[in-house]
Structures are given as C-alpha cells and as structure tokens.
Image: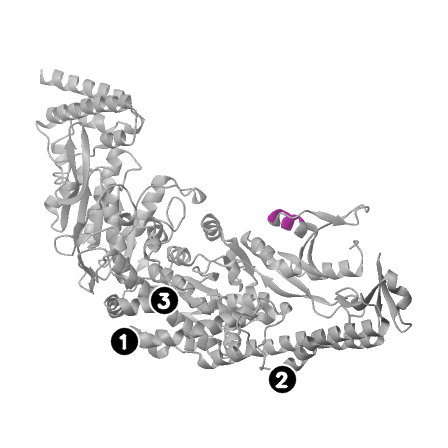
C-alpha cells in the first residue's frame, strides 16, 4: 500500500470516477478506505485511523472494515448523508495473473437503498428529481426498494414545497443550473436536509429524457404513462431513471410502472398546514407520538404502514371514491370476527414490496425467498375472508389478489424450511431438489463414516491404539501419533506437522480422500449458488405480480386498520357529499382525547355552511380550547376524506378542496423573514388561493405588530375571506371583530365558555353562540405560575388602563360607540368635520415604544386638556 504500487495506481484510477463517494476498496477480507475517505469514514464509523508506509514522508491514511459485516458500516455512512461506492474483486485471486481485477459494482446513496435493514419499514425512501420549466415545475420520485415511481407537474414554488413536504425525499436530483437556485436549495437545506446531487444537463434535455424513459420501459411512446404532453414531468422522471441506472448498474431493478397524478385530485394540504395539524410529526419534537398518524396507525404490515401515510397526506376529493372506502370500513367494522381473522393473517405477512425489490438483484439472500414463500401461505386466507363482504372495494382486492401458488410451490420444494441469511453458510437447498447436489452431500456425509473406519483400520494395522484421524482448516486431514509411538509409524506415512507431544502425518489413501471431499465441498457451494440464482431469477421475473398483490394487501391492511381504530375509539361513518356544508355533532379531537390531560374531553357541535355560518369568529382566553376546536374540525375533514370514520356522534362533510391554517408564530431566518413577515406571507397565500370549497383556520391574525395595526389587518382579512365565501374558523383576542356579525349575514360569533369563580376562572371547553369581551390573560398567567407579585401588579395596571380608556372615550364622544361604526364616510366629511386635536395626537403615538406608565401619563394629560377645553 505504498504510494506508488500497482494496487495504489488501480485505486487512484477507480477513485477518480467517484470523487463524491466514499470508495470501499476490496483487499482480501477487508474493504479499505484511503486518504480523505479514510478520515471521513473513521469519524462517522468510530474507527481508528491508521496508515501504511508510516516511515515515508507522506503516509497514506487508512481504515477498513471486514467484508462479511460491511452492511452495518454502509448503513452508518448513508445515514450521515454520504454516498458509498463499493469496489469489488471481480475475478478469483487464485486465478489472477498479476493484480486482481476490481471495479465498482454499485454506488449506494441515501435515496437508493435496497436493504430493508437500513430502512424504516413503515416509511418510504424516496429519491426525487426536480425540473424548473418555463411555466411550472416537474417532479418525479421513486422508492427503488418498493418499485413505486410517480410524477406530476406543479404550477408554483409553493405547490412544489407542498409535495416535497409530503414525500420528504432522502436525495434530490437537480440540473446543473437549478443547483444554483438559492431559494430552492436553501429551502431544502433548512427543511429535512436531503442529499443534493447534480445530474448532467444533457439528461434533462427533452429528447434525451424521452429516450431514457422509453429504453427503461421498453415502449415506443410515453402515452401509456400519461406524460406524453407533460414535458416537465418527462425531464424529472428521466433524471431519476438515469441516476438509478448509473448507480445501481447491473442490479437496477426495472420499474414496472410510472404513475402520473394530478395534485388537484386530492385534498390540498400545504407544508404549514401539515405541520400545524401535526399529521405525521409533532411540532416541538418531530415525534410520531401525539400525531394523527399515532392515533390511526394500527397497521399490521409494512406495506399498510407506508400506504396509511399516503392516505393521510393525500385525502381524496372524489365523493364516490371516498364513499367506497367508507363502505369497506363499515362492512369490516360490522363483522368483528372476520376483521380479527384478517388482521391475524395480515400480521404474518412480511414486507413483500421490499422483498421482491431485493430479490430482483444479485444481493438477494436465501432468507428473502423464504420470507416471500412463507408470506404467500396467508394470501389464500385473505381472499377467503374477503369473499364474505359485498363492498366493491373489498371485492376488487379479493379478485385481483394473486395467491402466488406457483411461486410458493417452487420455493417450498427448493428451499429448506429455515435457510440461512447467507449462501456462504450453505444448507440452503432442500434434499430431493437436485440429484447432483444430493450425491455430493452423500460423499460429504459418508466421509465421516469413512474416517471412522480408516482410524479403526490404521490402529489395527500399526498397533498404535491412541492413533486418531482428524482435520483442521489450515492443514486439512491428518493422522496424529504421540511421540511415544513414533517407532511404530509405517514408512508410507508422510510427516505433515510437528506438535509438542505428537506428529501428524498424511497417507496416500487419506490424501486421495481429502481431495475427493474438498472437490465435493467446493462443488456443493458452487451448485447451491447456481440453483439459488436460478430460483431468484425465476421469482424476479414475476416481480409485477408480486408487487400488485403486495399493494392490494397494503390497501386491505389500511382498511382493516381504520375499522379497528373506529371500533376502539367509537368513531362513526361520516356522510360525505358535495353540498359544501360541514356539520359535526359532538365532535372530538382525535389526538387530544387519547392523551391523559387530567380532565374529560368535552365534545362540541360545529357547523360551517354557505348561508349563515361561513365565517365563525371565535373568542375566548388562551388555554380555553380555541385552537383545539379548530384543529379538530380540520383533522376530522382529513379523516373523512381519506376514507376513515370520525370522532363524533354524527358528521356531514361537504368535500373540501384545500385546507389552510395560519397558526402560531415562527421566524424563517433562512429566507430573511421575521415572525410577522412569515405570518403575513402565509396569510397572503391563503387569501390568494382559497376557494369557496376550502376550509381555512386563522388563529390570532395580526398579533405580531402593534395593537391598532394588528386589529386593522385582522378585520380586513376577515372581510376579504368573507367575500371569497370560504368556510373559515377565525380565533381572535380582538373582541372588536365580533362587530362583523352585525353587518355580515354569514358571520357568526362564538366563544369558548369560561366560568369566573372568585378570583379565578374555570375552563369549561364548550363552544357557545355569542362573543366574549374578556381575554383573561392575567388569569392564564396566574395558572402558568407567574409570581403573585407580578399578577397583582398587572391587575392594578389593567384596571387603570381600562378606566382611563373609558374616560377618554366618553370625553371625546360623549359615549362609547362601536369601534368600527361609520367606517366609510361620505365625500367631504373630513373637511366638514375636522379631526379633534386629541384624535390627531393619538394617531401620532408610537404604542410599541410606550410603557404602561407612559400610557397612563399621556392619558392623564389628554384628559386634563379636554377638561380645560370644556371649562
């Protein structure tokens, strides 16, 4: 391993082609990493960094891992966001003339992993290609481990971000020009930080892209995939295929299908809404516990677990498709015995999607084929149980599900019951499957009897009663004689090894036997490998059948899961239609009711429609439950449109096209946006994209700026959303917004009821008609543990401010009118009725920089000037 040897020259030549990958270079029984690769790998893997040629001026940094346990090390490197190029010996070292031939046989990347041990079984592992067209975006993504491959076209950056937030690819492919787009790369880096990989520009050229796809699928056009006219989708899809073929090389499993979809077919849930509603991950910890997925996921299979996430991310908008899912869940729920039997059978089925993906490569293991064989036994039971139902969806699953009987029978006859993980361990092929293999195994098994007979014969022939025949891996077979009996050793014995107390010999007869046994063992290993490869290739040829059945099993698993959840948590089937009405009776928050908060969950009725209840202004203190109530409405809509039952006594859901939420406050420092700017950007997007069929949740609009600015913005936003006709839940501490209901027919005031008890308050969690005029912020602060002295002081300041405000209003107007009454004045009124000097002075006040004491002093001065004026 000195700096200039044939091996090092070979290494440098290979490494030059993989500059962005850790090169694992096979040397004997180890994969070695050198130079900078060794420095990086040693830190990630926790290995000691050594070097060869330590006495030279420039020693070569080095670290290595055993080849037979390399997978665990590869996993750690991939998890760190690093590519790994595997450089194998591609010829037998014993037969090599000179240096052993080596080449890279695969490049492993975070987005292209076939080994299920490296992956979360219920999470898809996507690699995505993104293309920026003249009028929109092309997006394609694939999971090479399951064979899933999808593409779509999107209008704007926000739409792209929504889709990426749903799929969260581990690796993103970009053209050389798009890799310089700081807005896109900045967003990706600040979100889940996928590995960004640049693909050469020629791959993205339309003509090249079309040829890449047609070559992969073996078609003369792209019309069967529905993308013939979708040029941006074609470019993105081709980049994914090209990159996977380049990295997986000979082991690239063929995709059977490319699915083109329109995001308009699904309920649109943008990235902020997905995060705010905590569909898959909690906001604070990014954990599953405490999410909608946590409540719903009772799936029994990995396929079902992955599909459930897709159903949550992509609820349907087609009423008939939704009803078919509800019908299936309802039938399953009504047959508890059949439901339990289905779930028991499903629990026995392995991850068939990922199994067939790995079986389609040379890295398949004997245990993979055995797992597929064993899983197939339970498909017939699933079909039989499904025959009890009338649901059209369950009938389709039953009729299209393939029992894979031919594959099962072949594997059952060929494989032992419990084959090892590796072919190296032998004992994979069942006795009776191959006459030649059975004959070779007989030679090996008969050898033990032959050795015993030889040992007995030699003892009798030589008179050495302690003589024994043995074997070790280094010296092979031998006859061992103690030194006290060496004078009895025949001349035909050939000395092989000297020990402290004995000598070991070989005889011509034993030598002949050894060669026969070794040839048999070598042939057994080769023949088992040949037979296994034939089995693997035969099953891989049926990958399409296996994948289709696996997808149906996943769908059945999700439907049974939703039925099981509905039974466990007392959910009901919602009535889904196109009326635009959302009417929930005794609705509950699916997540909050499952968490022990020390109090009973209080159900609430909620109605949204286009006649009288389009915009609900909801007031009440913090902690009363405004946010919980609004979120539960959104979650119930998602649950209904994904095909599930809902936590309520009854519910009618007029299908929603989009759900928007503007909740909470957060900076987006990567884009140079403050908390309030983020709030306004999200609000602007909602106001520009919401429709009459949308559902909007606004929680405390305008709180990030001064009181007057914020109140004005909240009022204007409410008026605009009212004009749009969008069904909206609008929680606010600006109680003045309750005045909207006076002049707007479709606005209703509601409050979360709070009962005053002595000096404190009791949260009753009940939504009641009418507005409240108190925020109880100081009482909430008291409950939060703010020191009593601070609470007492705050109450005193509040009383003075309220009194001063009342006195000022009375002095200016002779009474206290509604805040927004007479908002639009006739032309010329300003000149006819000039502003009072006190009003002018108030308009010039910078409230943000004033302390409560400053405010009180100012109010006193204004009051004094008014008194002097009256006098």
Q: Position of residue 193 (x, y in %)?
A: 49, 51
Can residue 401 be seen in this snapshot? yes
| Of labels 2 and 1, the one closer to you | 2
In 3D space, how far apart are the residues under numbered discs 2 and 1 (Cα atoms)? 45 Å
Q: Quadrant of the C terminus?
A: top left
Q: Position of residue 787 (x, y in %)?
A: 30, 24
Quadrant of the frame with the N terminus: bottom right
| Of 587 and 313, the residue lying toward us | 587
Q: Residues within 10 Å of mark 1 (few under 14, many from 20)?
A: some
Residue 229: x and y in percent read: 41, 73
Q: Is residue 402 left or right of residue 35?
A: left
Which residue lies under the disc numbered 2? 435
Q: Quadrant of residue 21?
A: bottom right
Q: Position of residue 366 (x, y in %)?
A: 56, 70
Mark 3: secondary structure: helix
Secondary structure under badge 2? Answer: helix
Give the alpha-carbon distance from disc 2 to disc 3, as whole Å. Answer: 39 Å
Q: Is-magenta flag for residue 41?
A: yes
Q: Report which quarter residue 553 is drawn in.
A: bottom left
Label 1 residue SS: loop
**Quick check: 600 left or right of 432?**
left
Residue 344, numbered circle? 3
Residue with the mark numbered 1: 388
Nearer mark to the viewer, of 3 and 1:
3
- Range of magenta residues: 39-44
Circle nearer the N terminus (2, 3): 3
Spatial CA distance of label 3 from label 1 is: 16 Å
Which quarter of the picture shows residue 810? top left
Q: Is residue 808 above or below residue 486?
A: above
């Amino acid at each position: 391993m000195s700096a200039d040897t044939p091996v090092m020259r070979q290494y440098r030549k290979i490494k030059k082609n993989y500059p962005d990958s850790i090169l694992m270079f096979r040397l004997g029984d180890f994969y070695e990493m050198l130079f900078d690769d060794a420095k990086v790998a040693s830190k990630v893997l926790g290995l000691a960094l050594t070097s060869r040629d330590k006495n030279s001026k420039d020693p070569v940094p080095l670290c290595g891992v055993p080849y037979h346990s390399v997978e665990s090390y590869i996993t750690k490197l991939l998890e760190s966001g690093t590519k790994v190029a595997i450089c194998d010996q591609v010829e037998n070292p014993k037969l090599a003339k000179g240096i052993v031939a080596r080449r890279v046989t695969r490049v492993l990347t975070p987005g292209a992993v076939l080994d299920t041990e490296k992956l979360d079984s219920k999470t898809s592992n996507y690699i995505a290609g993104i293309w920026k067209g003249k009028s929109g975006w092309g997006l394609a993504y694939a999971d090479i481990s399951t064979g899933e491959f999808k593409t779509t076209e999107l209008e704007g950056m926000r739409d792209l971000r929504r889709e990426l937030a749903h799929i969260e690819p581990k690796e993103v492919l970009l053209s050389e020009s798009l890799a310089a787009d700081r807005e896109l790369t900045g967003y990706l880096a600040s979100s889940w930080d996928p590995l960004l990989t640049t693909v050469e520009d020629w791959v993205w050229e339309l003509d090249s892209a079309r040829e890449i796809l047609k070559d992969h699928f073996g078609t003369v056009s792209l019309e069967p995939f529905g993308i013939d006219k979708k040029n941006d989708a074609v470019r993105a899809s081709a980049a994914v295929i090209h990159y996977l073929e380049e990295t997986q090389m000979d082991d690239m499993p063929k995709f059977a299908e490319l699915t083109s979809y329109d995001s308009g077919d699904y309920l649109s849930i943008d990235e902020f809404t997905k995060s705010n509603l905590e569909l898959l991950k909690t906001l604070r910890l990014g954990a599953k516990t405490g999410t909608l997925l946590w409540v719903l996921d009772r799936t029994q299979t990995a396929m079902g677990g992955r599909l459930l996430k897709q159903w949550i991310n992509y609820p349907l908008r087609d009423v008939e498709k939704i009803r078919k899912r509800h019908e299936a869940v309802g039938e399953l729920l009504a047959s508890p015995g059949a439901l339990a039997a289905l779930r028991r059978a499903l629990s026995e089925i392995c991850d068939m999607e990922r199994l067939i993906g790995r079986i389609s490569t040379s890295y398949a293991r004997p245990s993979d084929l055995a797992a597929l064989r064993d899983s197939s036994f339970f498909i017939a039971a699933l079909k039989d149980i499904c025959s009890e139902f009338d649901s059209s969806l369950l009938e389709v699953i039953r009729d299209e599900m393939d029992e894979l009987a031919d594959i099962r029978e072949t594997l059952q006859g060929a494989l032992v019951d419990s084959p090892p993980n590796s072919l190296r361990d032998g004992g994979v092929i069942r006795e009776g499957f191959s006459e030649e293999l059975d004959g070779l195994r007989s030679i090996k098994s008969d050898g033990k009897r032959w050795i015993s007979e030889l040992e007995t014969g030699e003892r009798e022939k030589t008179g050495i009663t302690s003589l024994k025949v043995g074997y070790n891996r280094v010296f092979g077979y031998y006859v061992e004689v103690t030194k006290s009996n060496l004078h009895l050793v025949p001349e035909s014995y050939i000395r092989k090894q000297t020990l402290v107390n004995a000598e070991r010999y070989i005889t011509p007869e034993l030598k002949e036997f050894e060669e026969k046994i070794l040839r048999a063992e070598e042939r057994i290993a080769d023949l088992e490998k040949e037979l296994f490869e034939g089995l693997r290739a035969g099953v891989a040829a049926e990958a399409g059948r296996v994948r289709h059945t696996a997808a149906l099993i996943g769908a059945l698993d999700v439907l049974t899961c939703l039925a099981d959840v509905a039974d466990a948590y007392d959910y009901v089937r919602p009535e889904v239609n196109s009326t635009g009405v959302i009417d929930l009776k005794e609705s509950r928050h699916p997540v909050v009711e499952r968490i022990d908060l020390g109090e009973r969950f209080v159900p609430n009725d909620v109605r949204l429609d286009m006649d009288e209840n389009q915009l609900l202004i909801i007031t009440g203190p913090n902690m009363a439950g405004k946010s919980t109530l609004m979120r539960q409405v959104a979650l119930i809509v998602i649950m209904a449109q994904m095909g599930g039952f809902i936590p309520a006594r009854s519910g009618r859901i007029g299908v929603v096209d989009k759900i928007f939420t503007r909740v909470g406050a957060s900076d987006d420092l990567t884009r140079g946006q403050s908390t309030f700017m983020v709030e306004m950007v999200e609000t602007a997007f909602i106001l520009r994209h919401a429709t009459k069929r949308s559902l909007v949740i606004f929680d405390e609009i305008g709180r990030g700026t001064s009181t007057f600015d914020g109140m004005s913005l909240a009022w204007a936003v409410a008026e605009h959303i009212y004009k749009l006709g969008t069904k909206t839940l609008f929680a606010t501490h600006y109680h003045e917004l309750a005045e909207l209901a006076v002049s707007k027919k479709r606005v209703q005031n509601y409050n979360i009821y709070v009962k005053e008890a002595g000096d404190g308050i009791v949260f009753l969690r009940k939504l009641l008609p009418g507005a409240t005029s108190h925020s109880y912020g100081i009482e909430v602060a008291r409950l939060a543990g703010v020191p009593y002295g601070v609470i007492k002081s705050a109450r005193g300041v509040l009383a003075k401010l309220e009194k001063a405000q009342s006195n000022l209003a009375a002095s200016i107007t002779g009474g206290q009118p509604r805040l927004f009454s007479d908002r639009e004045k006739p032309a010329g009124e300003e000149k006819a009725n000039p502003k009072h000097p006190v009003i002018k002075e108030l308009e010039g006040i910078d409230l943000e920089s004033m302390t409560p004491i400053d405010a009180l002093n100012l109010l006193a001065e204004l009051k004094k000037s008014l008194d002097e004026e009256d006098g």
